[in-house]
Amino acid sequence: MDKDLIKECIQELFVQIWTKRNSIGIPVHVKNYLYKSFRNLILKKVAQLQKHRNFDEIENYEFNVSLNIEEALIDGERRKAISEQLQLTISSLTARQREAIFLKFYEQLSYEEIAEVMGITVKASYKIMARSLDFLRDNLSKEDLLLLYLMFNLRLFN
């Protein structure tokens, strides 16, 4: 989209708001009102500039969004903090618990297969897994626990 057209539309929008301020009233959600007004003004200007286009073409306009650098940095820092918290909590498990979690969720082994790999009984594999999950449940927030679950499941589909 043309940057000059966008600047013109922003200017025109605020001029319209100022000139019609007595008849507009106060919108409930100002941000939504501005977005909708700006969108309508852009579509109107594009239609005026390209009268030869039909209505269907105007409806299928391109809409691109990109995060600014601050949002990307904040998002990266948040992911890093969550990852560190997950790693710290998992490292607090015993070696056998970490191994059982790895075999169950990462390698998708059954309890019988876990018992065989670890050289323990099937009952012991259930106990180790239950204690591991209890520890994680007690030491992670619901969001972190869900994220851990999703990470294991997304790994399965890759």
Image (cartoon, rainbow, N blue to C red):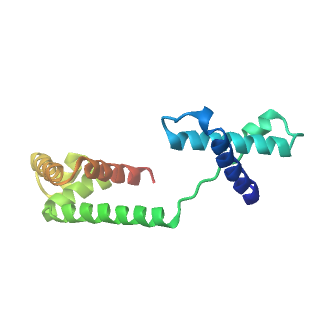
Vertical arrangement, residue 14 with respect to residue 91, above or below: above
Q: Nearer the viewer, residue 45 or 113?
A: 45
Which quadrant of the view contains residue 119? bottom left
Vertical arrangement, residue 23 with respect to residue 8, above or below: above
Q: Nearer the viewer, residue 37 or 23?
A: 23
Image coords of residue 27 (percent x, y): 52, 35
Count the marks: how many?
Answer: 0
Q: Is residue 119 left or right of residue 32?
A: left
**The C terminus - image quarter:** bottom left
Q: Is residue 39 left or right of residue 51?
A: left
Q: Residue at x 86, y 39 (%)?
A: 53
Q: Nearer the viewer, residue 48 or 10?
A: 10
Q: Residue at x 35, y 49 (%)?
A: 150
Image coords of residue 113 (percent x, y): 23, 50
Residue 108 in sight from this viewpoint: no
Residue 120 in sight from this viewpoint: yes
Q: Is residue 74 left or right of residue 57?
A: left
Image coords of residue 9 (percent x, y): 71, 50
Vertical arrangement, residue 113 with respect to residue 58, above or below: below
Image coords of residue 129 (percent x, y): 16, 50
Q: Nearer the viewer, residue 157 or 62?
A: 62
Q: Residue at x 53, y 63 (%)?
A: 68
